Image (spheres, rainbow, N blue to C red):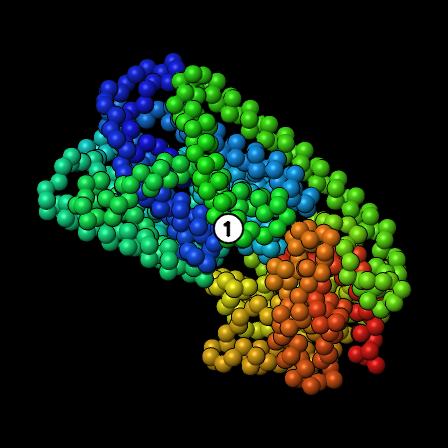
Amino acid sequence: MTYIDTAAPPARPLAGEPSTARRTTKAAPRTDIQALRALAVSFVVVNHAAPDLLPGGYVGVDIFFVISGFLITKHLLGELERTGRIRFGSFYARRAARLLPAALVVSLVSLVTAWIVLPFSRWAGLAQETLAANFYVENWVLALKSVDYSAQTESASTVQHYWSLSVEEQFYLVWPVLLVVTFTLARRQRIHRRALLALVLGAVFVLSLLLCIHMTFASRNAAYFVTPVRAWEFAAGSLIAVQAMRNRSTLPATGRTLAGVAQVLGYAFILLSAVGFSERTLFPGYLALIPVVGTVLVIASGPASPSWSPNALLAARPVQFVGDVSYSLYLWHWPVLLLVPAGLGRELQPIDMAFLLVGTLVLAFASKKLIEDPGRTSLLRRYGVRRSLVLLLSVMLAMILLAIAITVAAGAAGARQQAALDAISGGPCFGAKSLSNDGCGDPFGPPALPQVGPDEAPWFTGEECAEASDPIMVSGGARLSTCDFAGADEASGEAWLVGDSHAEHWKTALYGLARESRWHLQESLVGGCPYIGVRRTEFNGKPSDRASQDACLGWSQEVSDRIVEEKPDVVFASAFGAREVIDDGSGRNQASQYRDAFTARISTWVDAGVRVYILRDTPLTLDTTGPDCLEAHASSPLACSLPSQEALPGDPLAEAALAMDSPMVKVLDLQDQFCPDGRCYSAIGGVHVYFDSNHVTSTYMRSLTPILAQRFGQANG
């Protein structure tokens, strides 16, 4: 977010800094820019609080980026015009004093509160992201997580929204240097300054926009967070600042009319994107031009406007108030929305949300008055640049130490939980065993341990497993492991496990079967990728970019080729087919496409003499049967159960396997171990069934080992 006065004069000298600026009279803030800030932060808050009401509210960030480019460039060009140079130390010190105090306080309060109200499984991740946020690299952390499937199901952190602040801080590091170099070059080469600036900034705009369009198609998730992809939005605002170097104080009537038309169009573009865009929109890409052009039209048309312009309405004091507190409101709204429901132990109702948003607005006002304004107006003046930076760095050091302490505490809590689970795992009523033991009483009571630890994640490397000497490479990572479950004995057979993360969460149970059978097992698992040879165009409700589609196709083909070449005895496969939309180009329904693609792929394995076992996919939690629900209903776990017809959608791959009607292709269906009586449960036999919104815990899978072995034996009988 950009937070520099919209019409401020040169600031008073810092302590020990000579005065080089001419004294000017402070002008009133531009109400149109304050209105844009108010709209931008309101869009983001509403989108986070009630995404169905404003599905494209995330464009508020794009509005802020344009404002940033305009205000910072205007400020820096003003200094260059007056003095011929930029005092980098003073510039960065002012930015730190303006932004860091509030950001540090919010992240510190959020981290401590999360430590109190959230389960220990969340602590380490929150601590690490808090550090990333306060060192302004959160956008790169999220970019990496966006292409890491195992990280995509993680719950949001309290500082996830700091990604946009990170982008802005990175912009602040580069932009003054670019302007100084351009200004110096223009002076030395006797080139018109404004023309050269327009040329350079225009080049940044075009190149970054082209990169944005390319990356959005190639890797949409990462493109959203990467700084070079967003640079064109800052450049758009900067170009307005360059044009404003010939600023006019008044406009004739015709000029006001044209300005009003531009403002109407600008606000229309902004509202169109906020209302019309959604999570499914291929964004940012070229579609980001709509809110960016809208913002440019509003800013470039200037504060002067006719009475019928939206600027007149948006100059109202309530709107201006929201614009004034927009930075603090942006900082506080996300952790409040995340932590208050956790502290209350229940979901928020609409009336709760209304009170919460009003309370957040009050909190933002207090934060501005008590933290923002003192940091901006008196911190540097009172302590000087050096002492102020030392003070801020000391707070950051304290944050680092706290984050380390929380990470250590999370590790210790996880170790205690794992030891407790190991202690009860051999009991006759442990997990799925309770479903077949009449002496266990109610198998659907509260779990023995209230929280799900990080060791319950399905993505782990078994002790018997190591990276294959000839791995399958996917997006730069090795995706083939070799596991020896025969030990000193000769292996009784060769097996493969292939699929996405819904094949991966079967590993614990399958490893038990492999040990019992003394198999040599190879596994190749790529999150979100179907193992059939067809493009996956959508995953879990979101469009797939071309790069991920190509990567999945290449991986599945290489896996298939290896299986045909090596001819293992058995192949186990599973996938999240209920949430993977494929497209073979025929336009037919998903069931038909899956059936034909599955048959074409599996037939090559069968023709090579391979027996194929499809692990029928597990139920969906639908955000009702997961660990968060059990945390909120510790004494009434049945509140976290669902009817089978809701939680158990059809598995198109299992259905395709049955349709093949081949003795070499079998379906292993263990759904009765999740939904034994027409309902799907979140706790069975004192064990959490789900690790997150759609993956099963390793502990519950461990309890399924004897049932999986029994069903496997029956399929071979």
In this picture, is 273 found above or below 653? above
Q: Residue 139 vs residue 435: left or right?
A: left
Residue closer to the observer: 695 or 276: 276
State which quadrant residue 187 falls in: top left
Q: Position of residue 662 (x, y in %)?
A: 71, 85
In this picture, is 421 found above or below 441? above
* Total tally of numbered discs in the picture: 1
Q: Residue at x 88, y 61 (%)?
A: 428
Q: Position of residue 308 (x, y in %)?
A: 19, 49
Q: Residue at x 21, y 50 (%)?
A: 262
Q: Residue at x 26, y 23 (%)?
A: 83
In this picture, is 557 found above or below 716? above
Q: Residue reaching furthest front?
A: 351
Q: Residue 184 vs residue 190: left or right?
A: right
The residue under label 1 is which amino acid type?
Ile
Q: Position of residue 603 (x, y in %)?
A: 65, 81
| Whether residue 544 is visible | no
Q: Position of residue 699 (x, y in %)?
A: 77, 57
Q: Residue at x 69, y 86 (%)?
A: 661
Residue closer to the observer: 228 or 188: 228
State which quadrant residue 94 falls in: top left
Residue behind mark 1: 351
| Whether residue 29 is visible | yes
Residue closer to the observer: 350 or 429: 350
- What is the crowding at mark 1: few (fewer than 14 residues within 10 Å), some, or many (at least 20)? few
Q: Residue 194 vs residue 417: left or right?
A: left
Quarter placement of the N terminus:
top left
Question: Which type of secondary structure does the marked residue at label 1 adopt?
Answer: helix
Quarter placement of the C terminus:
bottom right
